[in-house]
Image (cartoon, rainbow, N blue to C red):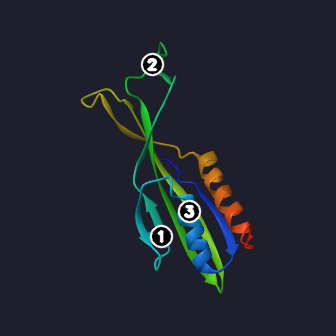
Amino acid sequence: MLSEPVVERYVACPEDSIWDGALDVLEPYPVTKKDKGGGVIETDWHDQPIKNRPYGLFGRDGLGDKERSRLTMTLKPIRNNVVVVRLSERRQHWGFRGGGRIYAWGPMEPDLDGLEHIMKQFTVKLEKQGCFLE
């Protein structure tokens, strides 16, 4: 079972500013769900090619290897103008599987560095507005 790491920040800021900042940092991704009342933003699968990732005993190049990921950001108010922001990712790899399904999507570990990068963009955006993040 693959873990689903979550990057988390506590934000002291007006909730509308937090919501708008979250939408801004997720703009490059295909957002499929915007539930402001429920505090959830989800993206659709975002594909990306993989280069020079060998597989197998002889380190051959994969045929059509690629990865895709989906992001979920939740914003949960815990008191007046303090919100817990959580960002998680579900990631899959398209590649050789063997058996009856030679190529298929398979789960892989999330990109924690990528999640931290997105959360850093979010942090910088809100700090410029005078918000406090922990």
Label 2 secondary element: strand
> Which residue is at the far left?
100
| Residue 11 x %, y % | 68, 73
Instruction: Please name the amino acid that badge 1 sits on.
Output: Val
- Sequence-earlier tag: 1 or 3: 3
List the residue tagged with mark 3.
24
**Mark 1 to mark 3 CA distance (whole Å):** 14 Å
> Is there a contact, CB below 8 Å, between mark 1 and mark 3?
no
| Residue 103 x %, y % | 32, 30
Label 1 secondary element: strand
> Is there a contact, CB below 8 Å, between mark 3 and mark 2?
no
List the residue tagged with mark 2.
61
As rendered, which of 114 and 121 lies closer to the eye?
121
| Residue 101 x %, y % | 27, 31
User: In the figure, residue 7 lies in which quadrant?
Assistant: bottom right
Relative vertical location of residue 58 with respect to residue 130 in this rendering, above or below: above
Q: Residues within 10 Å of mark 1 (few under 14, many from 20)?
A: some
As rendered, which of 51 and 88 lies closer to the eye?
51
User: In the figure, residue 43 lies in which quadrant?
Assistant: bottom left
Of circles 1 and 3, the one toward us is 3
Q: Residue at x 71, y 71 (%)?
A: 129
Q: Residue at x 47, y 76 (%)?
A: 36
How many marks on residues? 3
Instruction: Please name the amino acid that badge 2 sits on.
Output: Asp
**Mark 3 to mark 2 CA distance (whole Å):** 36 Å
Q: Residues within 10 Å of mark 2 (few under 14, many from 20)?
A: few
| Residue 94 x %, y % | 39, 35
Q: Residue at x 42, y 55 (%)?
A: 30
- Sequence-earlier tag: 2 or 1: 1
Position of 2 with respect to 21 (left or right) is left
List the residue tagged with mark 1.
40
Instruction: Please name the amino acid that badge 3 sits on.
Output: Asp
